[in-house]
Every structure is written in C-alpha cells, then in structure tokens.
Image (cartoon, helix red, strand yellow):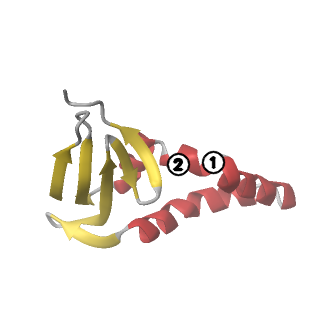
C-alpha cells in the first residue's frame, strides 16, 4: 500500500515521494536485488574480510544484514493484520530509490 504524490518531469519521468507499506519485505529485497547490492562493493568486501578472518562469519553477517537494513529504511508496522514495514520511496526523473539505494528505473511515460 502506498500514499504520496508523483508528478511527471518534462521528459516524462516520475518525480516525487511515496510512503510504502509492504508485507513480506524480504521478497521486495530479492526483487530489487538489494541483497546482491549488499554483497558487492564496500559492504561485500567487508563481508569477505569477515570470511577470511573466520570462515562462515561473512555469511552470518549477510543473513543478519537484511533485518538491520529493514530497521534502517523504515519502521515495523502492520497491514491487514500481517507484520509489515513502512518506508519512504523516492522517484527522481524515473530513478527509483529505496532509502539511499537506487533500486530501479521507470521508463519515461511519454
């Protein structure tokens, strides 16, 4: 479920902010590839360093990172009697951001 305001930019991209409430946020993370993003770059390098320090430690950190990410991005709530998370979603000329992460791109509408 979402609330907010979106408008169109001169080139047809979406611009604006939504507050989105999601049941099953883990599925959304997989859909947007956020788990993959957390495995790459500086964060991924940190997990890899933990594995070198003690094999398996990086994997444990990866598994517990998703709940931490949920806590950082939004707040726990309830939707239709089910546990959910409410978080801001931002659109900038078609680019879609979930917190600080760009998770997608919406093609221009015209």
37 with respect to 17 (left or right): right
Closer-to-camera residue (68/19)? 19
Helix, strand or loop for disc 1: helix
- The image shows residue 24 at horizontal and vertical percentages of 32, 54
93 with respect to 40 (left or right): left
Write the residue at 30% across / 30% down.
Answer: 107
Q: Quadrant of residue 32?
A: top left
Residue that sits furthest to the top in the current view: 110
Q: Is residue 9 above or below residue 1?
A: above
| Number of numbered labels in the structure image | 2
| Rendered-image quadrant of the C terminus | top left
| Rendered-image quadrant of the N terminus | bottom left
- The image shows residue 26 at horizontal and vertical percentages of 40, 53
Q: Quadrant of residue 86?
A: bottom left
Q: Residues within 10 Å of mark 1 (few under 14, many from 20)?
A: some
Write the residue at 31% across / 49% down.
Answer: 91
Residue that sits furthest to the front in the current view: 10
- The image shows residue 83 at horizontal and vertical percentages of 27, 66
Closer-to-camera residue (98/23)? 98
Write the residue at 80% across / 56% down.
Answer: 49
Residue at mark 2 to residue at mark 1: CA–CA distance:
6 Å
41 with respect to 23 (left or right): right
Q: Which residue is mark 1?
A: 39
Helix, strand or loop for disc 2: helix
Q: Which residue is mark 2?
A: 35
Circles 2 and 1 in contact, beta carbons < 8 Å: yes
């Amino acid at each position: 479920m979402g609330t907010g305001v979106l408008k169109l930019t001169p080139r047809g991209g979406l611009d604006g902010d939504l507050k989105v409430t999601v049941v099953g946020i883990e599925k959304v993370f997989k859909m947007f590839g956020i788990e993959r993003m957390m495995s790459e770059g500086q964060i991924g390098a940190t997990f890899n360093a933990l594995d070198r320090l003690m094999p398996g430690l990086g994997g444990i950190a990866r598994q517990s990172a998703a709940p931490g990410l949920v806590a950082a991005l939004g707040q726990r709530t309830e939707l239709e009697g089910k546990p959910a998370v409410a978080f801001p979603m931002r659109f900038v000329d078609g680019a879609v951001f979930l917190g600080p992460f760009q998770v997608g791109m919406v093609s221009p509408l015209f």
